[in-house]
Image (cartoon, rainbow, N blue to C red):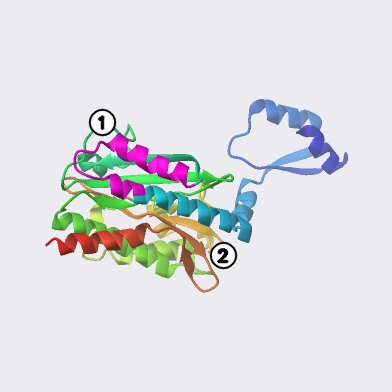
Amino acid sequence: MSHIALEILNGKKGKLGIAGEHLPMDLHLELARAFPRTKLVDCTRDLDSHRMVKSENEIRIMRKAAEIADEGVAALIEACRPGVAEYEVHQAAEKAMFDAGGDGPWSVILSGPRSVIPYISPDFTQRKLRDGDMVYADIGTELMGYHSDIQPVYIVGRGSKDQVDLVQTSLNMMKAMVNATHQGATDTEVLRAAYKTLEGNPFRDHVRTYTFGHGYGVGLDPPDLTGRTLTLPRNKQTKLKQNMVLCFEPGIFVPGVGGAAIEDEVVVTANGCEVISRCAERAESLIDQQRSLG
């Protein structure tokens, strides 16, 4: 690595930008020895800001990765029947993503009382689904080095009114975030739009605040949308730009009811945004289905 930087600097004094949250000590020492007259500076955020905005080709790949993940969602819904084990749902979803062309697909399947605690370990178990279970799922795949990450919500058989209202609450927040997303808006404005839908909602205190969304580029770490984003000063807010790819995932987890987190990927456009996955659309269908059961 040091010989590449030597060619760039050509023996001159200057600065050498290093991107990454954690630099191995041996690499730091090698660079310091190779460039005694050069100042090493952290340019992680600078690089991240460039990576946030995707090219048309990158978006094409990410759109396809989202389509592959949605094949996993379709298989998940098909598999979610009373008597089927969580690990069998996991297998069905991941096989569908492999069959659709995905690499390294993954899934988290939490049903019934386990759905109330997102990311509880293990990711899937021998537990068999029962009528009235809520299913919390988080799935995705990789394609040509790019990732998809989406969360469907499902109710096995006939759900309760509270469960349907829970799904509706997550869906309302998602719709508000999508409607608030456009070039020039900020992440704080998007999150405030979601929170506005919670006025008078009995589930408000059960909203997951550690993340409402993440990955300006899907898989790129900072910045996340969290409860803290709501109170950021204007100069700390991230302004959305065309061709940013975002994940929105408003989640609500209520003991005795279940967990619902709808996650979709969106691409910021000149006039709004394009939703490139179908979890909110499927949640609408689930709500209609459940209400038709009476």
Measure how far apart labels 2 and 1 are at the Cα level. Answer: 44 Å
Q: Please indicate, yes or no, whether residue 193 appears anywhere in the rendered image.
A: no
Q: Please indicate, yes or no, whether residue 199 appears anywhere in the rendered image.
A: yes
Segment tinted magenta in the rendering = 75-100
Q: Nearer the viewer, residue 43 or 148?
A: 148
Which of the two discs, 2 and 1, labels the residue nearer the N terminus? 1
Q: Nearer the viewer, residue 91 or 27?
A: 91
- Quick one: which residue is furthest to the right in this view? 11
Give residue 79's quadrant in the image: top left
Q: Nearer the viewer, mark 2 or mark 1?
A: 1
**Residue 127 drawn above or below residue 193:** above
Instruction: Name the residue type under label 2.
Output: Lys
Report which residue position mark 1 lands on: 126
Residue 47 screen position, x and y as percent: 64, 50
Crowding at dot 2, Cα within 10 Å, few <14 / some 14-19 / many 20+, comes out as many
Residue 188 screen position, x and y as percent: 44, 62
**Residue 58 drawn above or below residue 240:** above
Residue 256 screen position, x and y as percent: 15, 46
Crowding at dot 1, Cα within 10 Å, few <14 / some 14-19 / many 20+, comes out as few
Give residue 204's quadrant in the image: bottom left
Asked if residue 96 is among those painted magenta in the image, a careful observer would answer: yes
Identified at 52% across, 54% down, the residue is 64
Report which residue position mark 2 lands on: 241
